[in-house]
Image (spheres, rainbow, N blue to C red):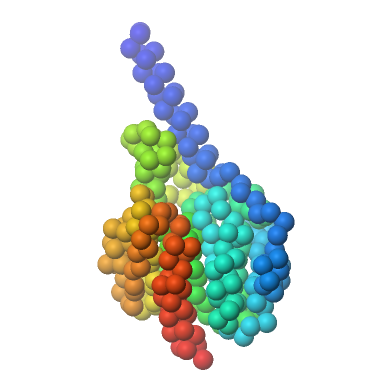
Amino acid sequence: MTLLLVVGVVTALLLGLSFLFAELLIYPPRNRPTDFTPSDAGLPFEWVTFASHDGLRLMGWLVGPELRKPPVVILHGYTDNKGSYLDQARFLFERGYPSLLYDQRGHGQSASAKVSLGPLEARDLAEAIRMLSERSRGHRFVVWGISMGAATALLAAADEPQIVGVVAESSYERLYRVVADTLRLRFHVPPFPLAPLSLAMASLKIGLNLFRVHIDDAVKSLGTRPLLLVSGAEDPRMTPELGSRLLGEAVGPADHLVIAGAGHAQCWPLGKAEYGERVLSLLEATWLNQE
């Protein structure tokens, strides 16, 4: 009887912790931007709202709306928001490229929603691309994603031919590995059995099998479209080795930039000069192909 009680308590504890981790995964804490806008940084912009794939309101900024080139879509990471990437938007604007920055589902000023760290967000990105196509007379677009945004960009590009190039900083490879590494590195607990239980519960909650989210397969699906992968040399989770593995899956022109001293999603401020040059090269190639 005592053994059964112990087993019951341990099982209840495991299920309870798995439920909490699943909730944290799909309902991240909200990091709302302050009341500043791109105009406070000297950048012309328009407010943009559009519907997610399931009808929720997503909020964003179109920076440089009068520029004639197609906008670059900039996607933030998990628990972040559009306000963190105005320096990238400035870099693009000064070189003649507009940009769309929007708060992904369940983040920033966008509607509350379940988050999936990629697959649901990729469907929302497809809606953003359709909205831009209507405004931009059918142009094709480059997406620049960071962390969750990078995975989102690659997953969407696999199904959206209007995405003609991807810049992916600090992308994960398999979603299961993200959960396992987070448990190990952030919470200092063994990944098994919490990682599979948490991901299974999250999958049930959002109605998608998150075990089947494979970014390496999405990289293959880019075909001949150009890809720039960016890794922080000190990133303990999305390591340079992971970036190299993704690079090895690329079929078309692909490059991998490793920024010395950078941790997760910290590459731009530490490697802006070289990072910017690589981004600009990709943009110029895709822009010339559209003229």
Residue 81 appears in the figure: yes
Q: How many marks?
A: 0
Indicate the quadrant where residue 9 lies.
top left
Q: Residue furthest top?
A: 1
Residue closest to the eye, 5 or 69: 69
User: Does 92 sit left or right of 196 as displayed?
Assistant: right
Q: Position of residue 100 (x, y in %)?
A: 60, 70
Quadrant of the drawing holding the N terminus: top left
Q: Position of residue 151 (x, y in %)?
A: 44, 60
Residue closest to the eye, 214 or 277: 277
User: Does 255 sit left or right of 186 as displayed?
Assistant: left
User: Does 36 sit left or right of 163 as displayed?
Assistant: right
Q: Residue at x 54, y 69 (%)?
A: 88
Question: Residue 76, relative to residue 94: is it above or below?
Answer: above
Q: Residue at x 43, y 49 (%)?
A: 209
Question: Residue 174, relative to residue 267: is it above or below?
Answer: above
